[in-house]
Amino acid sequence: TLAATGVIEVYDHYSNNDGVTVAYGARLFIKKDDNYIYGAGYNAYGQLGDGTTTQQTSFVKLTSWGTTVKGVYPIGSQFAFTFFQKGDNSIWATGRNASGQLGTGNTTDVTAAPVDVTTNWGGSSAVGSTSVIKKVIGGSSYATGTEAGFAGILIDDGTTTTFKMAGRNTEGQLGDTTTVAKSTPTVGFTPPGVGAANSADILTSLALIAILATCIATFKAVKAALILVSIVSSLLIKF
């Protein structure tokens, strides 16, 4: 059961409980004052990351995760999967992966132990890394015999941001101009303010700046000329 004391953080996600029925998929992660993560709930695909596929009706300590975890993202419900980030900014994944949503480069479920997917998602765990997860989106669903899962992770290193997506893409939801599922995270599009700016946009911006600068210079020149004309006129009137 959930301890009455010692809980310092609780982790959930809006997609947790989006399965066929609410009875499937619900799970919860907490951090206690020993800095370990504990998990409980549905675990058919290893989404709790405890190395089993056994449903846990009481919180189990996820010792293998270590004591530096700073974010847990439980995505989806019945066909669920989980991401978490450690203190060295490495990104880890566990659980269902039928559509490639974990970004491991394959569609094999991760049930034995969480796997490091840092590089695939555009992150870095090198010494001094500042690549932190800003947002994780995604979900899972099941309808008429078809299972679907996808995920997207936004990473910010303090200078640039990178947004990648992986998983089901039948409806083109990954935004990469195809309808092919991706097991390796892909940068499908570049929303305003995310990732490297489009070169055409840069050129357009520079052109606008140049035009503005020219207008300002012209205005200043005209203003100076008017002032000079005014002075000359004043002198002519005196003489």
Image (tube, rainbow, N blue to C red):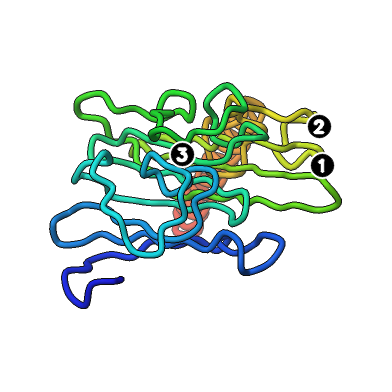
Mark 3 neighbour class, 10 Å CA radius: few under 14, some 14 to 19, many 20 or more: many
C-beta proximity under 8 Å, tags 1 and 3: no
**Residue sitting nearer the eye, 73 or 238:** 73
Q: Nearer the viewer, residue 239 or 105?
A: 105
> Which residue is depicted at the point 75% across and 52% down?
142
Please name the amino acid that badge 1 sits on. Answer: Glu
Q: CA distance from mark 1 to mark 2?
A: 6 Å
Q: Position of residue 181 (x, y in %)?
A: 72, 30
Is residue 190 shown to the viewer in this render? yes
Position above or below: 134 against 110: below
Res 179 label: 2
Residue beneath label 1, please?
Answer: 171
> What residue does disc 3 label?
94
Q: Quadrant of residue 77?
A: bottom right
Q: CA distance from mark 2 to mark 3?
A: 25 Å
For mark 1, give the secondary structure: loop
The x and y percentages for residue 204 are 65, 32
In front: mark 2 or mark 3?
Answer: 3
Labelled pair 1, 2 in contact (Cβ < 8 Å): yes
